Amino acid sequence: VDPSLDLVQEIQRLKKEKNAVILAHYYQDAEIQDLADYIGDSLGLSQQAAKTDADVIVFAGVHFMAETAKILSPSKKVLLPDLKAGCSLSDSCPPHLFAKFKEQYPDHLVITYVNCTAELKALSDIVCTSSNAVQIVESLPADQKIIFGPDRNLGDYVKKKTGRDLVLWNGACMVHEIFSREKIENLRAEYPGAKFIAHPECEEHILAEADYIGSTSGMLKYTIEDEASTYIVATESGILHQMQKSSPHKKFIPAPPNNACACNDCPHMKLNTLEKLYNCLKFDQPEIILPEDVINRAQKPIERMLEISA
Ligand code: 13P
Ligand code: SF4
């Protein structure tokens, strides 16, 4: 890329020229969030992808999110700035192993967290996100047997909230399992009025400490509506940009990780850069291509989720 190019301006120009929309997740770098047409959590992003009238969707997020957009809008071109932007949680559940797991519970309904491959969605009955998992489980009859995957932490949280006995797949997100309860307690002692907020992908002993548990959008909303002046935030650090923008006078502290060398950045989310975003708009690739049968099979469980959450 020519270093004299104003990337932001060029991205805006190409977006108009190609009738493209940029959808960005809260974990993206601040400069990407700032030029997105829509920023949201996984549910909000899939709702936008389903209703957009743009010809091209540029997904500033990770692979499973772009796949979900493609499944919901198969006739549109869906671009992902870096195809290597995967997800450790999605990787923790290979579809062929999940298919075998599922065979052991033939009378169970399968709910999959959206952080999984299109193949896995195609093996499920309903998809969910962190913002509607409890609602979706509660929408089913009390005696309905359920398999929930791939995130065991979200699964445990849903079990606790609903009182249902879910069969869980043992998967997890590498970013949400790094937090140190002891260091969080120390921080709380240092900032006595601070609220501790956490994403439900965090481990149970971390969630036990939280004043609020919710999706990225839920956490952001909470910090806007709540009256505390300081928040300790247990999720990927990208969300702090919107929190700080919405509440400039409040203080936001990333929850400390166990290991001093670790940080709260998702290495997959952070693969996207302005330069890659520019290139993908300019050259119409990398593009998400999915087999038609996978699109057809994965569509129903995602649409079921959207209907329940409408
Ligand atoms: P939400 O934004 O839906 O809460 O998802 C968090 C996440 O880990 C996405 O990868
Ligand atoms: Fe996957 Fe975790 Fe990164 Fe989200 S934060 S994309 S769940 S690895």
Image (tube, rainbow, N blue to C red):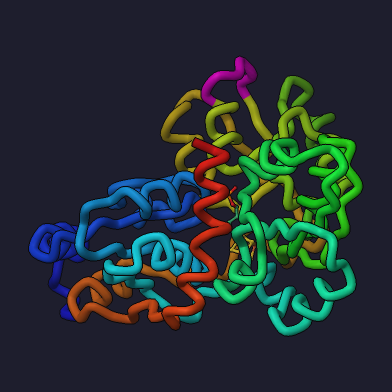
> Which residue: 62% across, 55% down?
127
- When the figure is inspected, residue 196 is found, relative to residue 93, above or below; the finding is above
Between residues 208 and 43, which one lies in front from this camera angle? 43
Q: Position of residue 189 (x, y in %)?
A: 84, 29
Quadrant location of the N terminus in the rendered image: bottom left
Numbered circles on residues, count:
0
Whether residue 182 is visible here, answered yes or no, is: no
> Which residue: 27% across, 71% down?
77
Side of 77 relative to 245 (left or right) = left
> Which residue: 53% across, 67% down?
298
Q: Is residue 81 magenta?
A: no
Type of secondary structure dominating the magenta stretch: loop
- When the figure is inspected, residue 117 is found, relative to residue 13, above or below; the finding is below
> Which residue: 49% across, 63% down?
299
Magenta span of residues = 224-229
Q: Position of residue 11 (x, y in %)?
A: 19, 63
Between residues 48 and 166, which one lies in front from this camera angle? 166
Side of 282 relative to 17 (left or right) = right
